[in-house]
């Protein structure tokens, strides 16, 4: 990833941020931090790094939003039981995004792991593209600026930092596995209860 950024510069930055926001789990901490480091080395411009990264994330996020908006709800309504989602869950998510859509997306765009997938529920909840775009741009700008500037300010110490990110990534991955297992167990029971309630006595 770092060699891709070093060789292709701004194009690589846009490709990587687009892919990460389109639900491909690429570590943006490394992408943006290293781009900031390249700006420190005068190979890139820090302002352009922040702007292009934000635009890349904004464009990529609309891929996830589109999947949720145009295929998500009808598909999940029919096949939800196979992915452990109930109609009640979807109705609740829709109402929640109607009331708190912008803050949910803004916050989601600055949380590791969650930020990669926040576009999907926003699309399923049919959040308007204008509201979604504004919220995503705001959260992405904060995230991209913070990590790019951190890489820029760290300068020559950047390579020491990447090891810390790698260690943190392993910890987050382990926690994510536990959380996913608990989630699947809980969702299985919820789907089973809904089926039993709908079954004739």
Image (tube, rainbow, N blue to C red):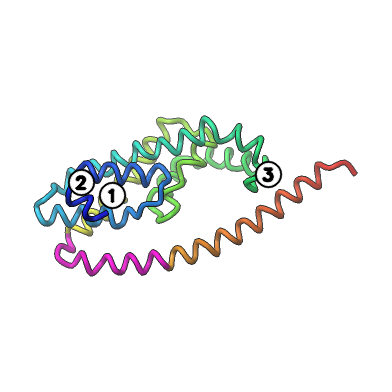
Q: Earlier in the sequence, mark 2 or mark 3?
A: 2
* Horizontal arrangement in the rendering, residue 68 relative to residue 187 (left or right): left
Quadrant assignment for the C terminus = top right
Q: Quadrant of residue 136?
A: top left
SS at mark 2 in the image: helix
Q: Which residue is mark 3?
A: 81
At 51% from the left and 36% from the top, the residue drawn is 68
Residues rendered magenta in the picture: 153-170
User: Residue 20 location, x and y as percent?
Assistant: 37, 47
Q: CA distance from mark 2 to mark 3?
A: 43 Å
State yes or no: residue 156 in magenta: yes
Q: Earlier in the sequence, mark 1 or mark 3?
A: 3
* Horizontal arrangement in the rendering, residue 137 relative to residue 4 (left or right): right
User: Residue 110 location, x and y as percent?
Assistant: 37, 52
Q: Is residue 145 above or below residue 121?
A: below
Q: Are marks 1 and 3 in contact (CB under 8 Å)?
A: no
Q: Which residue is mark 2?
A: 49
User: Residue 53 location, x and y as percent?
Assistant: 26, 44
| Label 3 neighbour load within 10 Å: few <14, some 14-19, many 20+ | some
Q: Which residue is mark 1?
A: 144
At 23% from the left and 50% from the top, the residue drawn is 4
SS at mark 1 in the image: helix
User: Looking at the image, which residue sits at the far left?
Assistant: 42
Q: CA distance from mark 1 to mark 3?
A: 37 Å
Q: Which is in the foreground here, disc 2 or disc 3?
A: 3
**Tally of marks:** 3
Quadrant assignment for the N terminus = bottom left
């Amino acid at each position: 990833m770092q060699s891709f950024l070093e060789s292709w510069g701004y194009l690589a930055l846009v490709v990587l941020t687009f892919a990460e926001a389109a639900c491909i789990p690429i570590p943006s901490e490394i992408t943006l931090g290293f781009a900031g480091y390249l700006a420190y080395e005068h190979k890139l411009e820090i302002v352009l790094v922040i702007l292009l990264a934000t635009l890349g994330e904004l464009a990529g996020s609309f891929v996830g939003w589109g999947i949720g908006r145009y295929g998500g709800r009808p598909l999940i309504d029919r096949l939800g039981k196979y992915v452990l989602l109930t109609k009640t869950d979807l109705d609740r998510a829709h109402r929640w995004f109607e009331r708190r859509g912008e803050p949910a997306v803004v916050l989601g765009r600055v949380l590791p792991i969650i930020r990669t997938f926040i576009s999907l529920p926003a699309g399923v909840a049919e959040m308007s593209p204008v509201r979604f775009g504004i919220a995503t741009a705001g959260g992405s700008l904060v995230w991209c600026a913070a990590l790019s500037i951190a890489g820029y300010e760290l300068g020559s110490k950047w390579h020491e930092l990447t090891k810390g990110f790698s260690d943190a990534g392993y910890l987050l991955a382990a926690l994510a596995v536990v959380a996913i297992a608990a989630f699947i167990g809980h969702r299985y029971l919820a789907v089973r209860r809904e089926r039993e309630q709908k079954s004739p006595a």
